Image: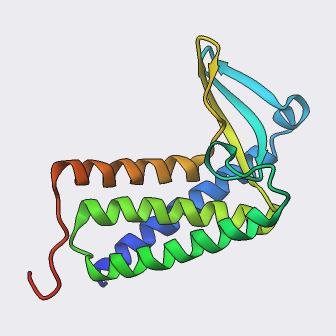
Amino acid sequence: MKRSAIWYLLAAGVLVLDQWSKIIILDWPLLAAQGKITVTPFFNWVLTWNPGAAFSFLAGAGGWQRWLFVALALGISVWIALEIHRHPGEKWLCLALSLVMGGALGNVLDRLRFGVVLDFIQLHAAGFYWPAFNLADAAITAGALLLLGAALRGSRLPKKGKP
């Protein structure tokens, strides 16, 4: 198996896990009836539909943003797939990119199916509520943090033509 295939499988796994979690949330009668279930003093299950991007960016834009976010996520996913193909041995880079790609595609499926993204995880403390998110968002965030960590460490991609 080609080394890049492992990273594509990881991205597919993130996508499947994200969609599976959303199926479970949508089929949970108690959550559907109440809209929120308190799990701990800092964690709730909620049922939230987000037409925007992170932190509800462009949520009230009237609907055109749906297709903008779908196009952006698909374009970025194609670029990520090419980068993984070019650098399959760069484990941390490919891990980060796989997480971002799987999460982005998970949210794309929501936008195509529902027109919006389903968020269901809510964290809060001392009266401050973090915007609700889903597993796709968590994967994107983890991937972005890995990329940021690599950049802060000074990691560089190998130059073309050099090992």
- Residue 94 in the image, given as x and y percentages of width and height: 32, 66
For the C terminus, give its image quadrant: bottom left
Residue at the far right in the pictured view: 33
Residue at the far top in the pictured view: 126
Q: Residue at x 42, y 73 (%)?
A: 80
In the rendered image, the vertical position of residue 81 relative to residue 39, given as above or below? below
Of 122 and 4, which appears nearest the observer?
122
In this rendering, would 85 be left or right of 109?
left
Q: Residue at x 29, y 63 (%)?
A: 93
In the rendered image, the vertical position of residue 159 relative to residue 25, given as above or below? below
Colour mode of the rendering:
rainbow
In the rendered image, the vertical position of residue 8 relative to residue 37, given as above or below? below
- Residue 15 in the image, given as x and y percentages of width and height: 57, 63
Quadrant in the picture for residue 30:
top right
For the N terminus, give its image quadrant: bottom left
Q: How many marks?
A: 0
Q: Residue at x 41, y 65 (%)?
A: 98
- Residue 138 in the image, given as x and y percentages of width and height: 52, 46
Residue at the far left in the pictured view: 163
